[in-house]
Image (cartoon, grey):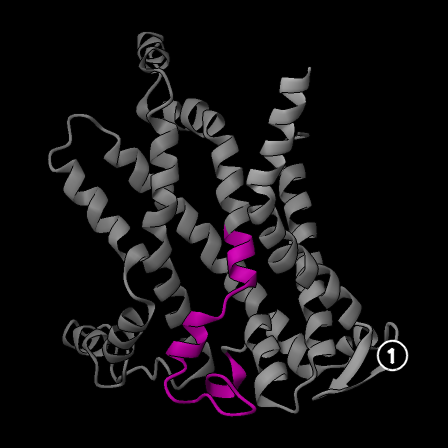
């Protein structure tokens, strides 16, 4: 018993440094930001407002616009990205396909590409005189150049294309790992029963991948609600103190939090309140996704 008690003490000693870091850099900011959200701050000055910051959000046109923008991007981009990831994973899981390693690497590379580098390339490609417009004009699909990054609608389209390009391969790797854990005997039995490839995909692959699909959906939802880097880098120089993108079309909650903290008169209390609303929205969407997927765990 003495030896076991001594081992327990040394165990706590060994993890104490990591535990202290966890409490100091993760738990404390979470609790302090919740406390701070009940104050209105002006630099170092602050006064208690209770739930005033949360009430203010419902009348803040910039915050409501950022929510509208992010939900449009979320509803369109996430389903397209996850569907493409699933299709690519299914195709690249075929053992008879040649150069599978090359295709997998090519699709995953955007996820590890420098954000600034790919943003610069996308801005060049989607400029008015860029590669995309030149191709569309040469194919006679459009009659005049599209103002991709200068028009509110097309700016969102460009952002959705960029995010899909970057994160499809990343999600594909999860599906690929899941597919390789499905026993081949199940597919062989289905073929003996006369099930086509399409039937196998919808009756075997999709149900067995449901936990991974749910995981990627929740992670993509959280990632989209935290969207910051792409809008800031793709705003094509239309980032000012009051707007991000043409007509604030690329303003997202995370960008707005940044503006409230560092571009406008700093109000960390109000920014904390916005952050907790985003956390609440992410939690609600995750619960809805669990319910829709029928997963009670």
Give the residue at x 26% y 35%: 91
Nearer to me, 44 or 175: 44
Q: Is residue 296 above or below residue 115?
A: above
Tell me where the magenta segment starts and ends, as one range: 220-249
Q: Residue furthest left?
A: 98
Q: Is residue 225 magenta?
A: yes
Figure label count: 1
Crowding around mark 1 (Cα neighbors within 10 Å: few <14, some 14 to 19, many 20+) is some
Give the residue at x 76% y 72%: 36
Which residue, given by chain and number where applicable, does mark 1 sit on? 49
Q: Quadrant of residue 260?
A: bottom right
Q: Using the rendered image of the protein, determine whether residue 294 is visible from the camera's viewpoint.
A: no
Q: Is residue 201 left or right of residue 56?
A: left
**Quadrant including the N terminus:** top right
**Quadrant including the C terminus:** top right
Q: Quadrant of residue 141?
A: bottom left
SS under mark 1 = loop
Q: Position of residue 284 (x, y in %)?
A: 70, 51
Q: Position of residue 269 (x, y in %)?
A: 74, 77
Q: Is residue 173 left or right of residue 265?
A: left
Q: Position of residue 140 (x, y in %)?
A: 19, 74
Nearer to me, 214 or 198: 214
Q: Is residue 191 left or right of residue 151?
A: left
Nearer to me, 187 or 236: 236
Q: Is residue 123 above or below residue 6?
A: below
Q: Quadrant of residue 214?
A: top right
Q: Using the rendered image of the protein, determine whether residue 221 is visible from the camera's viewpoint.
A: yes
Q: Is residue 119 above or below residue 85?
A: below
Q: Is residue 9 magenta?
A: no
Give the residue at x 32% y 73%: 116
Give the residue at x 37% y 22%: 181
């Amino acid at each position: 018993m003495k030896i076991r008690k001594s081992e327990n003490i040394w165990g706590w000693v060994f993890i104490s440094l990591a535990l202290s870091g966890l409490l100091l850099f993760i738990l404390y900011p979470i609790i302090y930001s919740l406390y701070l959200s009940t104050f209105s701050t002006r630099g170092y000055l602050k006064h208690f407002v209770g739930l005033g910051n949360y009430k203010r959000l419902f009348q803040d046109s910039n915050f409501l616009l950022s929510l509208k923008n992010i939900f449009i991007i979320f509803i369109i981009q996430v389903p397209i990205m996850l569907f493409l990831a699933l299709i690519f994973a299914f195709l690249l899981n075929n053992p008879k396909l040649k150069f599978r390693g090359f295709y997998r690497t090519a699709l995953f590379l955007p996820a590890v590409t420098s954000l600034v580098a790919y943003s610069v390339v996308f801005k060049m490609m989607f400029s008015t005189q860029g590669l995309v417009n030149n191709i569309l004009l040469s194919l006679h699909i459009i009659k005049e150049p599209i103002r991709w990054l200068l028009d509110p609608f097309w700016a969102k389209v460009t952002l959705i294309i960029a995010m899909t390009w970057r994160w499809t391969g990343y999600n594909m790797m999860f599906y690929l790992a899941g597919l390789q854990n499905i026993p081949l005997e199940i597919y062989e039995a289905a073929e003996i029963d006369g099930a086509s490839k399409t039937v196998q995909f919808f009756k075997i692959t999709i149900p067995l991948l449901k936990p991974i699909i749910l995981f990627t959906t929740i992670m993509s939802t959280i990632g989209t609600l935290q969207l910051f880097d792409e809008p800031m880098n793709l705003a094509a120089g239309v980032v000012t103190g009051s707007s991000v993108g043409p007509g604030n079309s690329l303003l997202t909650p995370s960008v707005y939090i940044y503006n409230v903290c560092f571009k406008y008169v700093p109000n960390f209390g109000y920014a904390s309140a916005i952050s907790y609303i985003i956390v609440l929205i992410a939690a609600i969407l995750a619960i809805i996704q669990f319910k829709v997927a029928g997963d009670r765990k």
